[in-house]
């Protein structure tokens, strides 16, 4: 069974950074691109970016709205993908999901989702 | 970025009804469109991709179609489990989502 599980959410102060982890099981992690999507009641669902699988270069693509503040990385040996978001703002408060697409080149449509982790940015 | 506009925002229906949700893209996206279903407290679930391709395991009462920049999700013979919020999402450029359509009990 394909599973993705996010961790690392919680309360973070404005201006600080967060790092979320996405631990996967049930599929060959190294063959797939992984993306991060967040959801808020106000802005809805927002794609943040993805990282390609190593056969496709392991490169990243990011949404313009978070470019410069976001880093997505992966450790294929541990089967974990990471999201780092810096200079946090109140509006970064959201449920953060890691998601998988059908293959390794891109992660732009999402057939598997984690359960989500809540991030609250507040002083 | 490409804007996705869904209508209606809320739809009241009864079990057995056929319901239609529309999503309009602000520019051409070919057929690079997906539909998701989300229930409260849960992650979205992929229903349809490439505008009309049914994801594995999704019941055939769900169908999608496209006409230019207008896309439609149709649920035939609505079942109790179908009351949820539905989102469209384009992936022609970096992905963007519609604002959602809540299908509620009439």
Image (cartoon, rainbow, N blue to C red):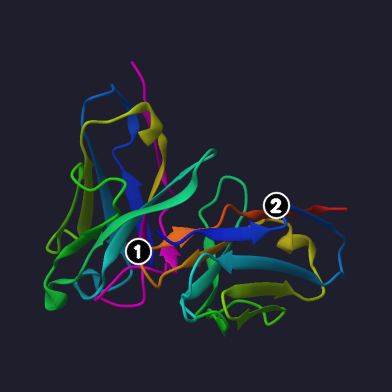
Mark 1 nearby-residue class (10 Å; few <14, some 14–19, many ≥20): some
- Using the rendered image, report if marks 1 and 2 lie on a common chain: yes
Q: Quadrant of the N terminus of chain B?
A: bottom left
Residue occupying the point 82% across, 72% down: B18
Check disc 2 and report its element: helix, strand or loop.
loop
Residue ranking furthest to the top: A123
- Is A103 included in the stretch rendered in magenta? yes
**What's the CA distance linking mark 1 and mark 2?**
24 Å
x and y, in percent, of residue A113 in the image: 42, 59
x and y, in percent, of residue A90 in the image: 37, 27
Mark 2 nearby-residue class (10 Å; few <14, some 14–19, many ≥20): some
Between A67 and A116, the residue placed more toward the observer is A67
- Left or right: B79 as drawn, with respect to A99: right
Q: Chain of mark 2?
A: B
The residue pinned by badge 1 equals B94
Check disc 1 and report its element: helix, strand or loop.
loop
The image quadrant of residue B38 is: bottom right
x and y, in percent, of residue B55 in the image: 53, 79
Query: Which disc number belongs to residue A44?
Result: none
Q: Chain of mark 1?
A: B
- Left or right: B85 as drawn, with respect to A90: right
- Left or right: A42 as drawn, with respect to B73: left
Residue occupying the point 46% across, 75% down: B29
Give the prevailing secondary structure in the magenta stretch.
loop
Between B67 and B56, the residue placed more toward the observer is B67
x and y, in percent, of residue B96 in the image: 44, 59
Q: Earlier in the sequence, mark 1 or mark 2?
A: 2
Between A57 and B25, the residue placed more toward the observer is B25
Magenta span covers which residues? A98-123
Query: Which disc number belongs to residue B9?
Result: 2
- Is B102 included in the stretch rendered in magenta? no
Label 1 close to label 2 by CB (< 8 Å):
no
């Amino acid at each position: 069974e394909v599973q993705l599980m996010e961790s690392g959410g919680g309360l973070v102060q404005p201006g600080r950074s967060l790092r979320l982890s996405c631990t996967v099981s049930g599929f060959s992690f190294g063959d797939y691109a992984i993306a991060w999507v967040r959801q808020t009641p106000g802005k809805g669902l927002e794609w943040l970016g993805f990282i390609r699988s190593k056969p496709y270069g392991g490169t990243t693509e990011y949404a313009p709205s978070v470019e410069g503040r976001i880093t997505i990385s992966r450790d294929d040996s541990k089967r974990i993908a990471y999201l780092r978001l810096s200079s946090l703002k109140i509006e970064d408060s959201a449920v953060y999901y890691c998601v998988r697409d059908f293959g390794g080149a891109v992660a732009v449509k999402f057939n598997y989702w984690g359960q989500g982790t809540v991030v609250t940015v507040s002083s | 970025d490409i804007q996705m506009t869904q209508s209606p925002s809320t739809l009241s229906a009864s079990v057995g009804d056929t319901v239609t949700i529309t999503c309009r893209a602000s520019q051409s996206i070919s057929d690079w469109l997906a539909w998701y279903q989300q229930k409260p407290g849960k992650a979205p679930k992929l229903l349809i991709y490439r505008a009309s391709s049914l994801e594995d395991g999704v019941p055939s009462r769900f169908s999608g179609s496209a006409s230019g920049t207008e896309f439609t999700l149709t649920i035939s013979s609505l079942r109790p489990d179908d009351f949820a919020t539905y989102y469209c999402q384009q992936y022609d450029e970096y992905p963007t989502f519609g604002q959602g359509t809540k299908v509620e009990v009439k």
